[in-house]
Image (cartoon, rainbow, N blue to C red):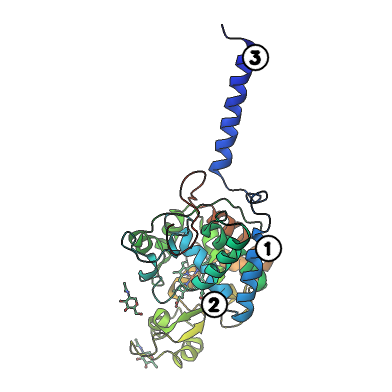
């Protein structure tokens, strides 16, 4: 016979099981509160000192988190090196000789391993580093949701498929972001990261020599000075993505687009007569709207397909599986 005590115990077990799996299935800002209370401050110190050494690192770290999240979710797959069982994502066309900041993440990881070994994932360190970087260079801050675990594999083919290219048109950008659950508004806000950082001549040469009407002639001519017309001459020469204030996080990126001074084709397509023009316009006039939309979109991007619970691992060294 089923007693009411037995029934209550079973019901209680069910509630516990449900709430436990709910905790595992989603990220939480207090994930390390018990297991590594100093995780966030340790990461922050490490990231801040790296950006103090080289200001561009703020941009590079934000981009690293983006390129992680868009490839099989925010699972630190981008950090894995080639090995007999892994084809690294680092060498696909969108990443090769371009994504950077790996040594900064490694330093933050080893600082965290010193205080709580085996607890904090590389994927979470990437997410926290991106937030700390934005904050450091005058951009918005936000509460980072935590509890991502690290992958045991990487996918160069998904990286090649899912990371946007500078030649992309608006339709394909909308689709790429849409496939990750991000709206046009999220995409425009996130592209506002190009308010900081640099791009190589090879990524904007065609645009500055196109003589087209979607680029400001004076801007094109300025950029040609350090980007020779014939590849591979000067392919790696750098230019700021935001010509006005390349070292601080503000809304000048959008103001540039209104003047047809986007550096990449994928920048200018956001303001070229299509459905995102109105959003660019709005952000160019309203820095605080941009700021709060950027913060929300970063949280949303950080939520893309995380490994949680018992999925994945906590890597001890970010560049290889344990
Ligand atoms: C919309 C599609 C996007 C395309 C096609 C794109 C493409 C690029 C390219 C080609 C560069 C220059 C890389 C180089 O020359 O080495 C770059 C730099 C950068 N991207 Fe994007 N990007 C996009 C969206 C984003 C998003 C969503 C973020 C972040 C949330 C982001 C953050 C950055 C940052 C911060 C830099 C400068 C990196 C540095 O200086 O190291 N980008 N991007
Ligand atoms: C990556 O860039 C290097 C040059 O630094 C080049 O030798 C290599 O072939 C590139 N890899 C791929 C897969 O394109
Ligand atoms: C664009 O104009 C520049 C300078 O006037 C010229 O050197 C270049 O060949 C032109 N490019 C094209 C694609 O027409």
Q: Nearer the viewer, residue 83 or 277?
A: 83
Q: Which mark is residue 197?
A: 2
- Report x, y in % for residue 130: 58, 65
Q: Which mark is residue 41?
A: 1
- The vertical placement of 223 against 105, above or below, is below
- Report x, y in % for residue 257: 54, 75
Q: In the rendered view of the protein, which quadrant contains the N terminus?
A: top right
- The vertical placement of 189 against 151, above or below, is below
Pointers 1 and 2 in contact (CB under 8 A)? Answer: no
Does the image show residue 89? yes
Pointers 3 and 1 in contact (CB under 8 A)? Answer: no
Local crowd at mark 3 within 10 Å, few (<14), some, or many (≥20)? Answer: few
Q: Quadrant of residue 52?
A: bottom right
Instruction: Specify whether tag 2 is near ligand 1 (CB below 8 Å).
Output: yes
Tag 2's secondary structure? loop
Q: Which mark is residue 5?
A: 3
Does the image show residue 195? no
Q: Quadrant of ligand 3?
A: bottom left
Q: In the rendered view of the protein, which quadrant contains the C terminus?
A: bottom left
Judged left or right of residue 9, residue 318 is left
- The vertical placement of 8 against 97, above or below, is above
* Mark 1 and mark 2: Cα distance apart in space: 25 Å
Q: Earlier in the sequence, mark 3 or mark 1?
A: 3
Picture residue at 35% right of the left edge, 62% below the top: 156
Judged left or right of residue 275, residue 129 is right
Local crowd at mark 1 within 10 Å, few (<14), some, or many (≥20)? Answer: few
Indicate which label's residue lies in the foreground, 3 or 2. 3
- Report x, y in % for residue 179: 43, 53
């Amino acid at each position: 016979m089923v007693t009411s005590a037995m029934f209550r115990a079973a019901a209680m077990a069910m509630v516990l099981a449900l709430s436990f799996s709910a905790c595992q299935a989603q990220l939480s800002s207090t994930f390390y509160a018990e297991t590594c209370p100093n995780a966030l401050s340790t990461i922050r110190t490490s990231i801040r000192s790296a950006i103090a050494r080289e200001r561009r690192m703020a941009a590079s770290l934000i981009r690293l988190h983006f390129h992680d999240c868009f490839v099989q979710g925010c699972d630190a797959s981008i950090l894995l090196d080639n090995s007999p069982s892994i084809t690294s994502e680092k060498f696909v066309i969108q990443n090769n000789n371009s994504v950077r900041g790996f040594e900064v993440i490694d330093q933050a990881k080893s600082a965290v391993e010193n205080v709580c070994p085996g607890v904090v994932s590389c994927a979470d360190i990437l997410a926290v580093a991106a937030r700390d970087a934005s904050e450091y260079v005058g951009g918005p801050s936000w509460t980072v949701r935590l509890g991502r675990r690290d992958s045991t594999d990487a996918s160069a083919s998904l990286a090649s498929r899912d990371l946007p290219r500078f030649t992309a048109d608006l339709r394909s950008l909308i689709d790429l972001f849409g496939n990750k659950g991000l709206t046009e508004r999220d995409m425009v806000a996130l592209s506002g990261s190009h308010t900081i950082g640099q791009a190589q001549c090879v990524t904007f040469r065609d645009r500055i020599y196109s003589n087209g009407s979607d680029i400001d002639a004076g801007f094109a001519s300025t950029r040609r000075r350090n980007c020779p017309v014939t590849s591979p001459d000067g392919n790696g020469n750098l230019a700021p993505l935001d010509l006005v204030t390349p070292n601080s996080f503000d809304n000048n990126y959008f103001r540039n687009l209104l003047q047809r001074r986007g550096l990449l084709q994928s920048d200018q397509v956001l303001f070229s007569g299509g459905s995102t023009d109105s959003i660019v316009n709005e952000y160019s006039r309203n820095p605080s709207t941009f700021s709060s939309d950027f913060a929300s979109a970063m949280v949303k991007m950080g939520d893309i397909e995380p490994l949680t619970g018992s999925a994945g691992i906590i890597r001890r060294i970010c560049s290889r599986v344990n």
